[in-house]
Amino acid sequence: MITVENEPWQTMVRHAESTFPKECCGVMLGVDGVVKSVVPLPNVYDGAQEDFFVMDPKDLQRVDEDARRAGQSVVGVFHSHPECDAYFSKRDLANSCPWFSYLILSIKKGKFDHANSYRADYDQTRADKEELVY
Amino acid sequence: MAKILIPTALRQFAENKDSVEVSGTTVGEALTGLTTQFPELRRHLYNDEGKMRSFVNVYLADEDIRYLSKDATPLKDGDTISIVPSIAGGRA
């Protein structure tokens, strides 16, 4: 189960809508499965960003350092699926990291539609939906 | 001694330490020292065959060790090693 407080939730939705029709990405920080803040990050994929995102590891490293100093942890990552439902795609699974929750926001016609959160396994063969509260 | 920064997501498997000082002449030896000291970390970093999981990146200072000498990358006193996952995906 993952719970997202209101302010980080609004930040994620705004980021996902403002980057539409491209995919956005970012990191969720918190404690014990509760997201207290989020850090939107640039999608550095050098191809069509409408259906793929890549997070720069250097960005993630910097955010992790900041979280450490703030007494928080990286509890998850988020990205958007423009004009698409918030399912865990084959490409999501093939690139997944089981350390984190993966929150996916469905953005349709530029506006938030729905969201789901998943946890992938260590072999990148399956991902289970987890309860998402926001 | 080199310092390995523990990702916040994995600190719970390293007695909540932010970083761990390890000895070793290579990055591979340092990582072995880390997982010997904290065995619970091992499955998060390596698969059952002992290979580093595909989503795990290891940096020596700012350099990805894949572009250095991988596990054989030499270490010197005071070096810092970071463990950073790859994050990507998409709707397709």
Image (cartoon, helix red, strand yellow):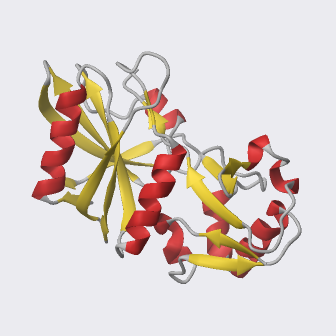
Residue A123 seen in this snapshot: yes
What residue is drawn where x is 47% and y is 51%?
A60
Up/down of B43 relative to B65, above or below: below
**Is residue A134 among the parts visible in the rendering?**
no
Quarter of the image containing the N terminus of chain A? Answer: bottom left
- Vertical arrangement, residue B68 with respect to residue B35, above or below: above
Please identify the quadrant where the C terminus of chain A is shown: bottom left
Q: Is B66 placed left or right of A122 in the picture?
A: right
**Residue A8 on image: x %, y %:** 18, 54
Residue at position x 66%, y 70% from top?
B4
User: Which image quadrant for residue A7?
Assistant: bottom left
x and y percentages locating residue B82 in the rendered image: 63, 61
- Which is nearer the eye, B32 or B73? B73
Q: In the rendered view, does B9 fall on the left or right side of B82? A: left
As rendered, which of A68 and B43 lies closer to the eye? A68
Q: Is residue B86 above or below residue A8?
A: above
Task: From the top left corner, tell me how far across and down residue A15 is, in percent.
Answer: 22, 37
Q: Residue at x 50, y 41 (%)?
A: A56
- Between residue B82 and residue B36, name the one nearer to us: B82
Q: How many marks?
A: 0
User: Residue A2: x, y in percent?
Assistant: 26, 59
Q: Does residue B22 sit above or below A65 in this rendering?
A: below
Q: Left or right of A130: which side holds B12?
A: right
